[in-house]
Structure formats: C-alpha cells, structure tokens
C-alpha cells in the first residue's frame, strides 16, 4: 500500500498529502454518477440442498422490494474458469446512494430476518463495500 501511495504521490506531484488522501474518498451523495456497492459472497455448506439454495436466492432477491434504501440489486452464480472462487458460489451486489442508506439496511428487520434464514446453511460469507470510481478519460 505504501508503494502505491508513493507512486500516486509521484504522479500527482506537486499534490499535497491531503489531495492524495482525497483520491481514495468518494462523496456521500445522491449523485447518480456515484454509488456505494455492497458485495456479498456466499459459500454454502456441502449438505445444503439445491431447493434450500433456491429459496435463499429468492429471499435475497426480494429484499429490494421491502427495503427502500436499496437503489439496485443483482446476483449470479460463479462461472469463472479460473478456479479461484475458493468455494464461494453466489455473488449478490446491492447498490446504495449513501453510507447512511447502507447503514439503514444493515440493521433493517427484513435484512436481519434474512440473516437468520441463511446462517444455518452458510459455510462462509464475504462482504466488501466500496464506492465506485467515476470513469476516467
């Protein structure tokens, strides 16, 4: 990380340290050109029945209709030929307008209820949140 910051610093010279730090921040706004992505990856226990997995998929896909802070939702199953998924098979991506919207989603009763549904069937879960960066010329 220090090496990357050093190279960014060298490329941005004569940028100040504050300007370099700003490169990693995205505004918290309703601007449709920015969005906060909430990526959730599931690794199911081997004994989880396909029907149960299907019910979980449907339950997750129903959350946007019950939680207004979710701007967009998409999901899919792994089909990468690289073999680097480490057993994670399902990816769900939720989009929020702001950190406040994401923070309202996390303790939302519908989200909590969904968590109770899936917990017995998951071997592992990975969550990563990030602000999308605007396209560069």
Image: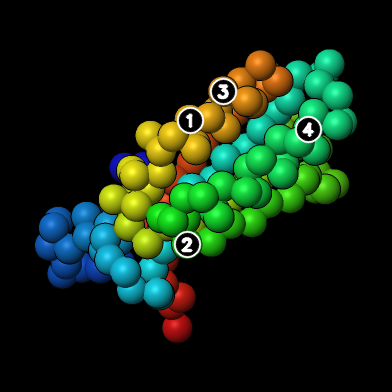
Q: Are marks 2 and 3 in contact (CB under 8 Å)?
A: no
Which of pointers 3 and 4 indicates the residue nearer the eye?
Answer: 3
Mark 4 burial class by Cα count in 10 Å: few <14, some 14-19, many 20+ = some
Residue 2 seen from this side: yes
Q: What residue sits right under mark 3 in the picture?
A: 116
Q: Is residue 118 above or below residue 5?
A: above
Q: What residue sits right under mark 2 in the picture?
A: 71
Q: Are marks 3 and 1 in contact (CB under 8 Å)?
A: yes
Q: What residue sits right under mark 1 in the picture?
A: 112
Q: CA distance from mark 1 to mark 4?
A: 18 Å
Q: CA distance from mark 3 to mark 1?
A: 6 Å
Residue 84 seen from this side: no
- Sequence-earlier tag: 4 or 2: 4
Q: Are marks 3 and 4 in contact (CB under 8 Å)?
A: no
Residue closer to the observer: 36 or 55: 55
Q: Which mark is residue 53?
A: 4
Residue 78 occupies which quadrant of the picture? Answer: top right
Q: Is residue 122 above or below residue 112?
A: above
Q: Are marks 1 and 4 in contact (CB under 8 Å)?
A: no
Quarter of the C terminus within the rendering: bottom left
- Sequence-earlier tag: 2 or 3: 2
For the point 62% across and 49% down, which residue is it?
62
Q: Is residue 32 above or below residue 39?
A: below
């Amino acid at each position: 990380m220090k090496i990357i910051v050093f190279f960014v610093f060298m490329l941005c010279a004569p940028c100040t340290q504050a300007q370099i730090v700003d490169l990693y921040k995205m505004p918290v706004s309703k601007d449709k050109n920015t969005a906060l992505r909430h990526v959730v990856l599931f690794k199911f226990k081997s004994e989880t029945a396909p029907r149960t997995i299907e019910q979980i998929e449907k339950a997750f896909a129903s959350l946007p209709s019950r939680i207004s802070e979710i701007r967009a939702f998409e999901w899919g199953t792994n089909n990468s030929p690289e073999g680097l998924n480490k057993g994670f098979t399902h990816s769900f991506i939720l989009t929020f307008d702001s950190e406040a919207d994401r923070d309202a989603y996390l303790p939302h009763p519908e989200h909590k209820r969904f968590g109770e549904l899936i917990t017995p069937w998951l071997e592992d879960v990975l969550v990563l949140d990030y602000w999308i960066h605007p396209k560069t010329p």
